[in-house]
Structures are given as structure tokens and as C-alpha cells.
Image (cartoon, helix red, strand yellow):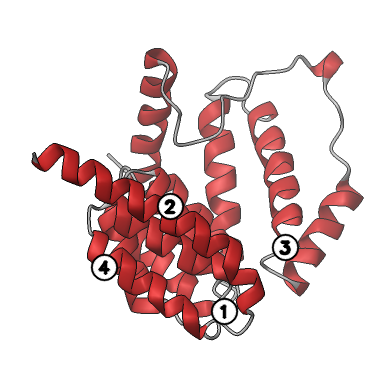
Amino acid sequence: MGLLDRLRNRAVIARTQGLRPALKPPVALVPKSRRVPVDAAEEVRLRERLEHDPNDEQAFRRLADIVRRRAAEGHEGGDPQRAADDAVWALAEETARNGRAWYALVELGRLSVHEDREGALRRLGTAAERDHSGQALAESLAVLREAGLPDDALGLGVGHWRPREHVIDAGRHLVHAAVEAGRIAEARRHLQAFDQFPDQQRVAGVRAELERAITEADQRKDRFSR
């Protein structure tokens, strides 16, 4: 069974069990008389925006909605959900071929993290390598934390985080991942690295948040050890 088939099966299971699906909700098959025509000119503009900036999140999400709808409506005799999912996956893969693209890789990692963990980690690692600001790393760590994989988030963050250069959210997710993984001492070490961040005024609020998280985790650990 291919990766896309496993993703679709997970979406079906999630809907029947009330869980959060790995993919977007199913696309309803809309009768021709009620369809809203896709603006071809808008699609061209969105693709041009992604060509100029492959990490334009707004353009990517809007274009993904367009290709999902077109693919679903073009498969009346088949499975519209499958067609929609394939179209979005193809869009992300196409965008990710751009050597500057990291956002599409994060989305591919998000879609595949439960069915292809190793592949997702490779995609997220590549995304982090392509972005010098640390935003891709921050979003990749968020994906892994949301998936319940704090140890993987910690491994990815330790390998890529540069406090002097990266956005503060990258370090924030890294410290939270260490706390969630039960590595309190390591969380404290990463928090100390916030001293290297150039804008200490911006660090103050985040530092207070992380110190609370570490203290609360430490207190829980003490209670359980008694």
C-alpha cells in the first residue's frame, strides 16, 4: 500500500473515531449547477507568487484549495476525496522542487508524519536546512510536537537550532519539546542558550513562559517520584 493510500485510510479511520484527520476534511461532491467556477486568472497569479516566493503560505493554501476542488469535481465517477488528496500532495511536491522552498516540505512532513515517520523527518530536516531564519525549524518542531513526537522534535532542533540567527519560536518549541520528552535538565540548558539571542527584550516574555513550563514539569516529576 502506497503512502497516499495509507494517508487516505487514516483520514477515514479518524472520521469514524472522532479523531483529528491527517488530511483536510473530505471534499463533498458538488452538483454542477451549484459549483463555483475556479478563477483561472487567480490560479495563474498564485502560481506566479509561489514561483517568486515558494514559501508564500497564503498563496500555497489558496492554491491548494483550488486544486482540491478542481480534482474532486473532475472525478464524479470515482473517488473525489482521493483525487483531491492526490492533487494537494502533487502541488506540495511540485513546489518543494524549488531549492528555496521549505514551506511545502513542512506540509508534506505534516501529512506523512504518522504513516511515514522517517520520510517526514527527512522532509522536515531538509526544510530546516533550506531556511536560515529558523522559521522552517520552528514550524517543523511544531509539527512533531503536535504529532506527539517530542523526542524527534528534540533531535531535529538540537541538530539545527542557532540561537543567534534563528527566530525565537524555534528555541521556544525546542525547550517545550525537551520538557514534553521529560528531559528537564536539557530544557534548562536550551533555555540558557537564549542568552545568545540578540534582542533580549523580546526574549523576556518567552523566557518567563518557558521557565514556568520547566518549573511545573519539575514539580510534577517530584510528586510522581515520591
Q: Position of residue 199 (x, y in %)?
A: 64, 80
Query: Marks 3 and 1, Cα distance to the nearest angstrom?
Result: 14 Å
> Which of the two residues, 180 or 195, is positioned nearer the viewer here?
195
* Pointer 3 with pointer 1, Cβ within 8 A: no
Left of 58 or right of it: where is 14? left
User: How many numbered circles does the render carry?
Assistant: 4
Helix, strand or loop at label 4? It is: helix
Which comes before the other along the chain, label 3 or label 4? 3
Query: Marks 3 and 2, Cα distance to the nearest angstrom?
Result: 34 Å
The residue beneath circle 3 is 56
The residue beneath circle 2 is 212
> Which of the two residues, 164 or 37, is positioned nearer the viewer here?
164
Which comes before the other along the chain, label 1 or label 2? 1
Density class for disc 3 (Cα within 10 Å; few <14, some 14-19, many ≥20) is some
The residue beneath circle 4 is 186
The residue beneath circle 1 is 99
Q: Quadrant of residue 26?
A: top right
Q: Position of residue 102 (x, y in %)?
A: 56, 68
Please state which amino acid type lies under the numbered disc 1. Gly
Q: Position of residue 222 (x, y in %)?
A: 17, 45
Please state which amino acid type lies under the numbered disc 2. Arg
Left of 116 or right of it: where is 28? right
Left of 26 or right of it: where is 180? left
Whether residue 116 is visible here, answered yes or no, is no
Query: Marks 4 and 1, Cα distance to the nearest angstrom?
Result: 33 Å
Density class for disc 2 (Cα within 10 Å; few <14, some 14-19, many ≥20) is few
